[in-house]
Amino acid sequence: MDFQPYPFEKLNTLIQSISTTGQRISLSVGEPQFKTPDFITKALGDNAPLLNKYPKTGGEESLKVALQGFIHKRFNVNLRLEEIVPSFGTREVLFNFPQFYLFGKDSKVIAHPNPFYQIYEGAAIASGAKTIYMNLLEENAFKPQLTKEQMQECDLVILNFPNNPTGSSLTLEELKLWVQWALEYDFLILNDECYSEIYTGLKPSSILEASIAVGNTSFKNVLALNSISKRSSAPGLRSGFIAGDSAVLKDYARYRTYVGCASPLPLQEAAALAWSDEAHTQYFQRQYAKNLKLAEEILGVEVPKETFYVWLYVGDDLAFSKKLLEKENILVLPGSFLSRVDRGINPGSGYVRLALVYEEEIIRESLLRIKQCL
């Protein structure tokens, strides 16, 4: 399998000859730098004695009920437990689910956004699937598009909205269109909604809501994916889920018993508490909102209402990333590392991704130095 180096490997190669002194600020990785709430870490410690037991691959009922409650409270969607599969984070699902779903198909075709989270590409390669890139460009408001012919060809369409890295989002009406297309052209649609809980103002919609809104109450051909990592500043807890079409998830749950990716019981118990609590998430939402407002004021750019990224146009993304590190000791991720050339263009070329994941004062100082470098 010919996997490309991860963006961060490419970044390390790009900057390997650059020497800096002092404290480096890394805005390159979307890893929350806020403390995980105490009630979550306490639950993890309190349940440590459960390490003497094997966890169920399908997840403990306490976790599934917590996920069911989160989906109901957040999206007003009532799911049956068989419509939810807990996962060990979401990266493993994004990699192994396409392999499961596409196995045995004569023609394997995946469509996903470009730029993208690189695990989508890895899944396509591991599945032996052809990829259709949905180029996210300024002229299409960084929103995905497929032609009728492409939809007829697709087996699986992966969306990622709210989007990493562009920060764009899809309205409920736009998500409804995608559900209708999935039904009309009979492809499976999976929306990676891992940034749905980082928002300012209106809450982003789930594709599960869209499915119900068009009368698809069985969620045929519709799946949503979500994670606790950004929501609770707990990426190390490795708690996520895939939810929707139970006909697909029934077989996928059986497949997972062979994969061996069950979450340890202490992590499941702590995650169940975290998914059940909404109050702690509001603190992180306020912090990210402040950081995005700072970016708008200091850099003079339009910032997203969802996610904590700024997709900043700088001209030459590779040269700017090197210059910013040399001059200001700030590390950002070149957009071209997150994209592939398609139809003669690399949609990420010329952009850098800023992950505004620190406390307000660190972000303020970083943005002022980025402005100076610009």
Image (tube, helix red, strand yellow):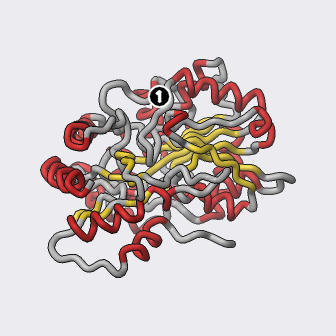
Quadrant holding the N terminus? bottom right
Alpha-carbon neighbours of circle 1 within 10 Å: few (<14), some, or many (≥20)?
many
Residue 42 in view here: no
SS class of the residue under badge 1?
loop
Residue lying farthest to the right in this orientation: 106
- State the image coordinates of residue 334 (x, y, percent, origin top left): 42, 60
Image quadrant in which you'd find residue 237: bottom left
Question: Considering only vertical position in the picture, is 71 above or below 367?
Answer: above
Say whether residue 182 is visible. yes
- Could you tell me which residue is drawn at 67 percent across and 53 percent down? 98
**Looking at the image, which is closer to me, 128 or 80?**
128
Residue 285 falls left or right of residue 343:
left
Q: Amino acid at mark 1?
A: Ser
Q: Residue at x 80, y 42 (%)?
A: 153
Q: Nearer the viewer, residue 248 or 129?
A: 129
- Of residues 66 and 4, the one drawn nearer to the viewer in this rendering: 4
Query: Residue at the spot x=59%, y=44% of the render?
Result: 135
Residue 173 coordinates in the image, percent (x, y): 55, 21
Residue ID for mark 1 = 205
Q: Is residue 183 above or below residue 142?
A: above
Query: Residue at position x 52%, y 23% from top?
Result: 172
- Where is residue 162 drawn, in percent x and y? 45, 38
**Image-based side of 10 in relation to 314, left or right:** right
Q: Is residue 192 above or below residue 324?
A: above
In the image, residue 281 lies at what x, y percent?
A: 28, 39
Which quadrant would residue 17 be assigned to in this image?
bottom left
Q: Is residue 189 left or right of residue 43?
A: right
